[in-house]
Amino acid sequence: MPTHFTGSRAEMRTLDTFIKLTRCTNSLLARLAERNTIGDLTYSQFAVLEALYHLGSMTQGEVGSKILKSTSNITTVIDNLERAGLVRRERDAQDRRVIHIHLTEAGSGKVEAVLPGHVAALVDEFSILSTGEQQTLGELCKKLGKGRESE
Amino acid sequence: MPTHFTGSRAEMRTLDTFIKLTRCTNSLLARLAERNTIGDLTYSQFAVLEALYHLGSMTQGEVGSKILKSTSNITTVIDNLERAGLVRRERDAQDRRVIHIHLTEAGSGKVEAVLPGHVAALVDEFSILSTGEQQTLGELCKKLGKGRESE
DNA sequence: CGATAATATTTCGAAGTCGAACTATCCGAC
DNA sequence: GTCGGATAGTTCGACTTCGAAATATTATCG
C-alpha cells in the first residue's frame, strides 16, 4: 500500500516502515509458496508438523500457542492433518479435556522429506542479505515483535 | 516456530531470522487487530479502501496488484465492500471486460474516520524502535522483499 | 473476415482464520 | 459432596485466500 497519507514526519516514517515490513513478509512467503518447498502441505499444516517433529507431542493448546493461532483454527488444521494420516489424536487419561497430538510415521516422514528443501530455499532467499544484515534484521524484528508490554 | 533444526551455521542463522521476521509481522498485526484500529473492517477491506482513497479509482486488477492478492480474492472482497455500500463497481464503456472500482461517500468517510487512529496505533507500536532503527528495518525489508530477481 | 490468443473478471472447491457460543471436564470453596 | 468458575476443545458463521476452470470480451494474425 504505497500511501499518500500526509502526516507528520514521524507518521510518514512509521507508515513507510510498516508497509515495507508487511510487503517483505508477504512477498517472501509468496515466493516460497511459488517454489513449492513444502509439497502439498499448506503453511499452517507444515508449521504444525514441524513443531511436533522438533518439540515432540503436544496438546492442541500447546500447538496453538506455538504457531500463534486460535484454538478453533487448530481444531480445523488438526482435522485435516488427521484425515491425511499425518497426525494422531489421543485423549489424556488423567485429564479428559486435553488431547495430545502425535506425529504418525507418515507425518515425520513428510517432515523429513520436505524440510531440507524448505531450508535450502530460505537460505537462498536470504542470501541477498549479508550475515550482519540478517542479524540486524532479526534483532529489530524481535524487538518490534515483542512490543511495548515486554519492556 | 522455535525450531531445533540442526543444520549448518548459515542455515541456523537464516531459519532464526525467518522465524523472527514472520513472528514479528504476525504479532504486530495481531496487536493492531486487538486495538481495533480499523473498526468493523477486515484488514483486506481496509487495504482496498485505503488504496482507493489515496490513489483514486482503479480497476479490480489494479487493486489486486496494489494489495498483492489474487484476482479471485479481489472479487470476493469487493463483493463484500459493495454490499456494505463502501464501494461502487462500474463497467468500462470502451473495454467491457474491465471494471472500475470507486469509493462511495460512505467509503471515503469510513477511511477518514479510521485512518488517523490506525496511524496513531502504528506510531505507538513502532515507537519501541528509534528513528534510525526504523530506517534500517525498512531498508532491510525492502531488500529482502524484492528478492534476487531484482538484482 | 474469422479463428485463435490474450485479458479481465467470476465461479467453485478446499483450506485457513477469527470470535462467540457451546460442551465436557476438572478444580476449589463452601 | 456439590455448585460455580476455570480450562480444553468443538461448532458455527462470516470472511479471506488460492488455484483451476469457466465466461466474456478484446486483440491479433493469417
Image (cartoon, coloured by chain):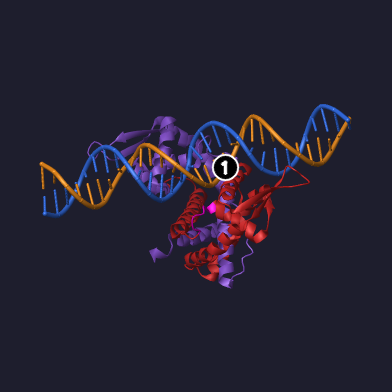
Chain colours: A purple, B red, C blue, D orange
Q: Where is residue A12 in the image (x, y as percent from the top left)?
A: 59, 68
Where residue B63 appears, x then y in whole percent? 65, 51
How many numbered marks are there? 1
The answer to whether residue A1 of the structure is visible from this angle is no
Q: Give the range drawn in magenta.
A: B38-43
Q: How crowded is mark 1: few (under 14 residues within 10 Å), some or many (20 or more)?
A: some
Would you place residue B138 above or below residue A79 in this image? below
* SS state under label 1: helix
Q: Which of B116 and A21 is in front in this view?
A: B116
Which residue is at the front of the view, B127 or B147?
A: B127
Choose top left, top right, bottom left or bottom right for residue A3.
bottom right
Give left or right: position of B7 versus B138: left
Residue drawn at the location 46% of the way across and 34% of the way down:
A110
Read off the residue under disc 1: A33
Q: Please, is residue A93 above or below residue A66 in the view?
A: above
Left or right, A89 with reference to A8: left
Name the subunit of mark 1.
A
- Mark 1: amino acid: Ala
Residue positioned 45% across, 32% down in the render: A109
Q: D21 or D18: which is nearer to us?
A: D21
What's the magenta bit mostly, secondary-structure-wise? loop
In the picture as drawn, the residue positioned furthest to the bottom comes out as A8
Q: Which of C26 and A137 is in front in this view?
A: C26
